[in-house]
Amino acid sequence: MELPYTYNIIVAAGSGLRFGGELPKQFCLLAGRPVLFHTIEAFRRTLPGHEIIVVLSEAHLDLWRTQCAEYGFESPDVVIGGSSRWESVRNAIVKIGTALPGSVITVHDGARPLVSRDVIIGAVRAASSPGVDGAVPVVPVTDSVRMIADDGTSVPLVRERLRAVQTPQAFPAGLLRDAYEMPYSSDFTDDASVMSAFGHGNIVLTEGSPVNIKITHPADLAVAEMMLKDRER
């Protein structure tokens, strides 16, 4: 099955407050190069010739330009992010404009630099299947999980029925564009939730990867570097 033309939005406009370092996580070094370089290159290798849009905070534009010049890295098109992830994605969708018929939009976290070809292609292929509203890569939950009620009590959940969501999430371009015309809601935790709120709830789950980790804390950089070295070997 031939892959459709794909617009790949890489969201990297976060301030990095949870990360706690001097630099936001997407600009920290992983194996000697900024995290965001690895993320962009994963899509360039997997989908050569397809469009990539990176979403950055205006406050980080000079830093990004400096890093690109220092490492001789060619930046994709850049869009300025908003005050929320939803607004950042919406800005990128506006930048895309009228998408090609039958095309797909993927949305990926800039801080997931180890995303594999299989995960990307699996999501894109599923999202381009007839009648499908979107595709989300997932992995099984391995820890025991409890849900806290309003009164502070908790109940166990059956982890065999739970999945942890990853990115890239992929959607038919026209459907995602229409969904992002809705006003913002705090219920929008990811792009699939935006689609579901718009009435496009046929979201299929595709195979994620335990290697497709999101850099959230400084220790995650060390873990990612070990995984990267294992992959290269």
Image: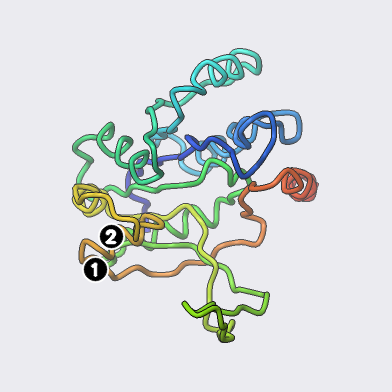
Rendered location of residue 103, percent (x, y)? 28, 47
Image point (55%, 56%), residue name: 118
Left/right of residue 26 with respect to residue 99 in the rendered view: right
Distance of label 1 from label 2 (alpha carbons): 14 Å
Rendered location of residue 160, percent (x, y)? 58, 84
* Nearest-to-viewer mark from 1 and 2: 2
- The type of residue carrying mark 1 is Gly
Among all residues in the image, which is located at the extreme front?
Answer: 151
Give the secondary structure at mark 2. Answer: helix
Q: Which residue is mark 1?
A: 131
Left/right of residue 190 with respect to residue 37 in the rendered view: left
- The type of residue carrying mark 2 is Met
Image point (37%, 28%), residue name: 79
The image quadrant where one finds the N terminus is bottom left
Q: Which mark is residue 195?
A: 2
Vertical side of 119 occupied by 157: above or below: below
Residues 25 and 6: in front is 25
Vertical side of 213 occupied by 154: above or below: below
- Sequence-wise, the earlier of marks 1 and 2 is 1
Rendered location of residue 210, percent (x, y)? 65, 62
Vertical side of 143 occupied by 114: above or below: above
